[in-house]
Amino acid sequence: FVLDRAYAVVDYHCGGDTSINYVLTIGDENGEEAENFHFARLMGTPFVFAHDADPFGGTIDGYMKSRGKLCAVAEQGGNSLPPGWYDLSAKRIDNFLDAMGMMQAVRTMPEKQLLMYERYIVRMDHGGIYIPEVDENALSTMVEGNTLLGRVIDPHSTEVLQEVRAPYERS
């Protein structure tokens, strides 16, 4: 089994009908999971979500950590990506390879990485077609609270079933 032979793995969870760009980890920089925490930050995303318990126990991430190996859950990708996305993704992998001594690379890191301990995932209350009001340029940016992010419409009548708005003062 390949995973048993790996020292470290990046477990990609790529957005399907959305665009995402953050990394998930557990713990903090000083605790029991410090090595995994620092490993995850190498993904170079502008946001890092640190949980107090592993949220992906049934995935590759959970398997690797149960074996005492490094793993980061990369929530990256989607259906609408900004220009240069694929080059940035390749440079992010170089960050890991450099850190593990497998190659020399100039690490690509954001000017600052926001560390968050809670996340709010916007879920739709109705089935239908989601029509975004913001484009891929808003990915990993802040918007004002109550900004209209998109609408869910009935595919038959085109009636607006739900407006999806930014949940926080600065979202």
Image (cartoon, rainbow, N blue to C red):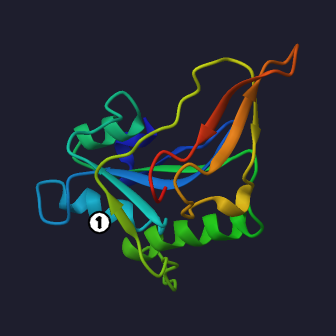
Report the amino acid beneath label 1. Answer: His
Rendered position, 125 above or below 108? above
Quarter in which the N terminus is drawn: top left
Please give the count of numbered marks on the rendered protein: 1
**Residue depicted at 59% across the width and 26% down the height:** 124
The residue carrying mark 1 is: 38
Rendered position, 115 above or below 109? above
Provide residue 134's location: percent of width, then percent of height. 72, 53
Say whether residue 134 is left or right of residue 46.
right
Rendered position, 63 above or below 9? above
Provide residue 110's location: percent of width, then percent of height. 49, 77
Provide residue 16's location: percent of width, then percent of height. 67, 37
**Residue depicted at 42% across the width and 77% down the height:** 112
Would residue 135 be visible to someone looking at this image?
yes
Say whether residue 36 is left or right of residue 81.
left
**Residue depicted at 86% across the width and 22% down the height:** 158
The residue lying furthest to the left in this view is 31
Q: Nearer the viewer, residue 138 or 150?
A: 150
The residue lying furthest to the top in this view is 156
Would residue 101 be visible to someone looking at this image?
no
Q: Nearer the viewer, residue 93 or 4?
A: 93
Crowdedness near tag 1: few (<14), some (14–19) or many (≥20) residues, C-alpha within 10 Å:
some
Provide residue 32's location: percent of width, then percent of height. 11, 54
Find numbered disc 1 in the image and state the secondary structure of the residue it sits on: helix
**Residue depicted at 19% across the width and 65% down the height:** 29
